[in-house]
Image (cartoon, grey):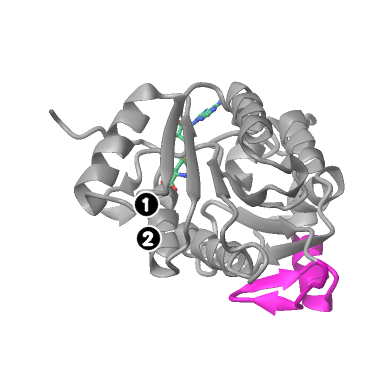
Amino acid sequence: MEDYQNPYHGPFTAWKIEGFVACMRMALCKSKGASVWHFPFWYLSANAGTGLNNGCEGEAIRFLREALKLSRRNIRACFCDIEPKCLEQLRRNVQSIFGELPDDWDLKYYPMNNIKFLDEVSKRIYEEERNPNEALGLAVFDPPSGKAFPRLNVVQLARRFRKIDHVNHWNLSWQAMEDGCNQAGQKGHEHFLPPSEMIEQIPKDFWFVREPCRGNSGQQRFYTLYGNNWRESRNRFADFHSTKTFQGEYILRTYRRFGDPNQGLLFE
Ligand SMILES: C[S@@+](CC[C@H](N)C(=O)[O-])C[C@H]1O[C@@H](n2cnc3c(N)ncnc32)[C@H](O)[C@@H]1O
């Protein structure tokens, strides 16, 4: 069978994945604490893709690698994509890269819209967890457009499961283009969701914003946010800064200016 290639990758895919991996390490390390290491770890991938992007390992494969490296038991990996071919390819990629995975791991594939996915996975957590409110894990949102980000369901997920951390990655340029905001003077930024608004809408106690990708002037703009409800927050990890620090605030402020059609290029 011929390999299926997901069209959603570009020159910044490797940078994006590096950011996801930093967040995976944070969430997985926290889940190795003495009181929680044997509880299931829920990995919810809402836009999973195929796991390989032109030779670059995608988020789904990298998560499995990180969890193996840390010998995390009881992984519940839930991969969703609206495109069934993507998930068929992901399943084949997982099989050919890893072969056998630990017996107490459970991988499931959800070929559906991620609105339905979040609903199904929430039901599953309620059924399988003794104390669902304490369910641990990480949810990753990597949508190709605003429409593929189920905002209300994401908020609901965050309210239900406080210990499932969130990573959101957005292509701002794409959004801006969709909304016609690059056409000077045009109104209509309904789908444009700057990170400052995202962190207000999704109830997490701590948010971290990643330093923007350098050297992409005139090209596409992305942001990555990581949110958790841990008892204490660090100021930074990898190239992510707490939004409560000067540097984090500065990055958020700069992104906010992106909505201004007169603003020109960012980060130059
Ligand atoms: C940027 S790609 C994902 C790449 C992947 N996360 C990785 O790291 O390799 C976005 C994916 O979202 C999927 N998608 C688009 N709309 C969706 C929706 N409403 N629900 C679920 N998946 C969707 C696309 O089919 C595509 O595979």
Badge 1 marks a residue whose secondary structure is helix
Q: Is residue 105 visible?
A: yes
Q: Are marks 2 and 1 in contact (CB under 8 Å)?
A: yes
Residue 208 locus on image (x, y percent): 72, 64
The magenta segment: 231-254
Is residue 103 positioned above or below 148 on the image?
A: below
Cα separation between marks 2 and 1: 6 Å
Question: Would you say residue 185 is visible in this rendering?
Answer: no
Check disc 1 and report the residue beneath it: 61
x and y percentages locating residue 19 in the rendered image: 53, 63
Residue at screen point 58% across, 40% down: 174
Picture layout, residue 239 above or below residue 199: below
* Coordinates of residue 158 in the picture (x, y in percent): 76, 43
Residue ID at (86%, 48%): 200
Q: Nearer the viewer, residue 41 or 194?
A: 41
- Dividing the picture into quadrants, the one containing residue 237 is bottom right
**Kind of residue at badge 2:** Arg
Q: Which residue is mark 2?
A: 65
Residue 191 picture quarter: top right
